Amino acid sequence: MTYKVAVAGCTGYAGGELLRILLQHPEVEIGVLTGNSSVGERLGDHQPHLAPLADRIVAPTTAEELAGHDVVFLALPHGTSAAIAEQLGDDVLIVDAGADFRLNDAAAWEQFYGSPYAGTWPYGLPELPGARDALEGSKRIAVPGCYPTASTLALLPAVAGGLVDPTQISIVAASGTSGAGKAAKPHLIGSEVMGSMSPYGVGGGHRHTPEITQNLLSVTESEVSVSFTPLLAPMPRGILATCSAPIVGDVSTAIARATYEAFYADEPFVDLLPEGSWPQTAAVVGSNRATVQVVADLAARRLIAISAIDNLTKGTAGGAVQSMNIALGLDESTGLSTTGVAP
Ligand SMILES: NC(=O)C1=CN([C@@H]2O[C@H](COP(=O)(O)OP(=O)(O)OC[C@H]3O[C@@H](n4cnc5c(N)ncnc54)[C@H](OP(=O)(O)O)[C@@H]3O)[C@@H](O)[C@H]2O)C=CC1
Ligand SMILES: CC(=O)N[C@@H](CCC(=O)OP(=O)(O)O)C(=O)O
């Protein structure tokens, strides 16, 4: 069967990456493509790398345009998904790359997003225990944020396995600039980003903090406290997340590696690297692969877990298609690759 798929937000970074992947998906036919300020323009003027779609014309983002599809991807600014979603039928699979339906805590939503809470949908991180069951057959999917994907994959086995104290988690994660979207922002002007790295959202203010906490809470009975510091790195794509927490009991690198190996043994898109090999963004760019490494720093009594993903692929569009595949009952890996494009 072929599924007719629409992409709202087709001119953005997330929409562009969705289309790059969907063009290679054997069970999908690409239908209507919508935008906002670029309505009426050629897609090729906005996504010059998507040659087969170059002459498609960007349509307005309305329920009328998006009707008649089996799957609708929303790659729109935060706060715009709910209004569109409620006008589409319950029988349409809606996959939202935005944040609107990720959090199950209304107070946390209001604190970090400052807008009315829209609710929660099945969460599109299949590696999270229980997530696949919720995604199978679902007509709604909330795609995780890119930092939460990288950080959660680095920490999940340690927290689920009781290797660390989850009340003292530290995450420092560097992201490529595409994470901020296409909309021009003064701090993203090339001359200011090139050759420099800078922190932002420091001190618990970044909106991905409650999402990471929610993910880790789902695998432990303990309280969870996360100190999350994002960094902007001078590269277009990729996230490198360095996570640590105090070791509980006698956890060696060998014990930690065995725990991670077992946890991710059947995961098609998460690789625990060989000992001594470290995750690097260049190795995963363009692929749906997450690489992970874990080591016990016995002098500091902390477990260090590092992950690398492409923020636009496993961190957004690839993860979205992986979850779509599960929801539709397709093989989870259909149309997705673990091969990158380095250098
Ligand atoms: N970039 C990333 O790494 C990640 C992004 N996401 C999420 O994906 C979503 C899109 O992000 P991203 O692609 O980076 O953003 P971009 O700024 O690159 O693209 C935004 C897209 O939304 C369209 N748009 C803007 N305003 C409206 C509106 N009011 N109504 C309808 N369409 C509108 C734009 O159309 P036009 O160009 O025609 O104006 C454009 O296609 C966001 O919710 C983001 O949080 C999620 C995970 C990671
Ligand atoms: C580098 C950069 O700016 N990254 C974005 C996160 C991108 C992402 O995953 O965001 P959503 O939650 O918006 O989907 C940020 O920190 O806001």
Image (spheres, rainbow, N blue to C red):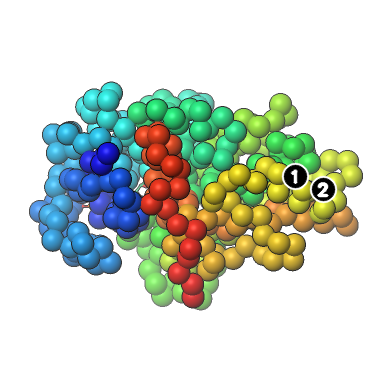
Q: Classify mark 1 as within 8 Å of ligand 2 or not, answering yes or no.
A: no
Q: Residues within 10 Å of mark 1 (few under 14, many from 20)?
A: some
| Residue under label 2 | 255
Q: Nearer the viewer, residue 277 or 148?
A: 277
Image vertical order of residue 168 relative to residue 342, above or below:
above
Q: Give the SS element for disc 2.
A: helix
In the image, what residue type sits under mark 2?
Ile
Residue 176 visible within the image? no
| Residue under label 1 | 259
Residue shown at the point (71%, 62%) measured from the top left: 274
Q: Kindly give the residue lying farthest to the front in the view shown.
A: 1
Residue shown at the point (40%, 34%) measured from the top left: 329
Say left or right for 123 vs 328: right
In the image, what residue type sits under mark 1?
Thr
Say left or right for 270 vs 184: right
Callouts 2 and 1 close, C-beta under 8 Å: yes
Q: Position of residue 48 (x, y in %)?
A: 24, 67
Image vertical order of residue 235 relative to residue 24, above or below:
below
Say left or right for 220 vs 32: right
Q: Residues within 10 Å of mark 2 (few under 14, many from 20)?
A: some
| Alpha-carbon span between mark 2 and mark 1 | 6 Å
Q: Position of residue 37 (x, y in %)?
A: 18, 52
Q: Give the SS element for disc 1.
A: helix
